[in-house]
Image: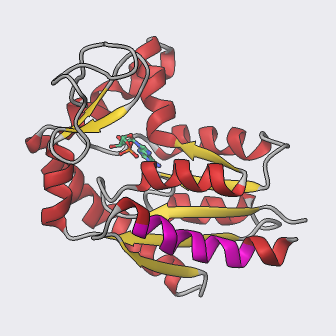
Amino acid sequence: MSRKVYVLLGVPGAGKGTQAKRLAGEFNLAHVSTGEILRSEVREGTELGKKVKEIMEAGELVPDDLVIEIIRCCLQNFPDKDGFVLDGFPRNVRQARYLETVSDAMGVIAINIDVEEEEVIRRLSGRRFCPSCGKIYHIHFSPSREAGRCDDCGARLVQRKDDREEVVSERLRVYREKTFPVLHFYSSKGNYFEVDGNRSVDEVFEGLSEIVARFEDDCL
Ligand code: AMP
């Protein structure tokens, strides 16, 4: 059975992380988030973490060779999984070309979660997370029971440094310049799908699941 690589595309705040986690659970896929892996390197103060900390806090992309190495390792792991869902990679056309070279035997399916920029700014500015267990909240859409405290472990919730307003606008600029061309890269190859991301988490998940199910059924 060939293992597929599902690439979730979309502006920062489109819901890639949330949806990737759910898809991974539903279809037995390995969820690979380059952003999450890099944030954990920063938290742990590793050599890689030290190199990327400031770049990430400024909302810029970290150098390609660093993220490519992360992806290279991940795609060789997870033998018990039926495929991969990538969240945050590729972020530019060079990374997309690299992915083609390593996933030839697997096949890449790109799905763009299409969300209006205004909606994204509302989502990102209210997003909070628990630095202890990683649970994600939103001050309006999914608040914790006690304001500012994690429901599960009681730790004080914080805002990601790159979710601050000035950094969000830089991330959107970087998206338009570097990541937007990736949509065209995939649509010109014919393995590209879009779902309307301006809907509830469940509705978006349903749209994504329909696409993934088509390919996973083919694999059986
Ligand atoms: P994310 O959680 O996907 O929004 O990623 C957070 C930050 O990690 C980004 O703003 C970048 O600084 C860095 N990052 C994550 N994935 C990549 C990638 N594929 N290429 C370059 N930088 C990345």
- Location of residue 148 in the rendering, given as x and y in whole percent from the top left corner: 18, 22
Residue shown at 46% from the left, 31% from the top: 38
Residue shown at 30% from the left, 70% from the top: 199
Q: Nearer the viewer, residue 88 or 70?
A: 88
| Quarter of the image where the N terminus is located | bottom right
- Examine the rendered structure and indicate whether residue 57 appears above or below residue 215: above
- Examine the rendered structure and indicate whether residue 153 appears above or below residue 2: above
| Quarter of the image where the C terminus is located | bottom right
Residue shown at 72% from the left, 75% from the top: 215
Q: Main secondary structure of the magenta part?
A: helix
Determine the image quadrant of residue 27.
bottom right
Report the side of 73 relative to 113 (left or right).
right
- Location of residue 74 in the rendering, given as x and y in whole percent from the top left corner: 69, 41
Inspect the magenta stretch and tell me whether residue 211 lies in it.
yes
Question: Which quarter holds ligand 1?
Answer: top left
Q: Nearer the viewer, residue 139 or 92?
A: 139
Residue shown at 79% from the left, 43% from the top: 76
- Location of residue 107 in the rendering, given as x and y in whole percent from the top left corner: 73, 70
The residue segment tinted magenta is 203-215
Determine the image quadrant of residue 11.
bottom left
- Location of residue 40 in the rendering, given as x and y in whole percent from the top left corner: 47, 23
- Judging from the image, the colouring scheme is secondary structure
Q: Nearer the viewer, residue 135 or 90?
A: 135
Report the side of 153 relative to 7 (left or right).
left
Report the side of 1 relative to 107 (left or right).
right
Inspect the magenta stretch and tell me whether residue 158 lies in it.
no
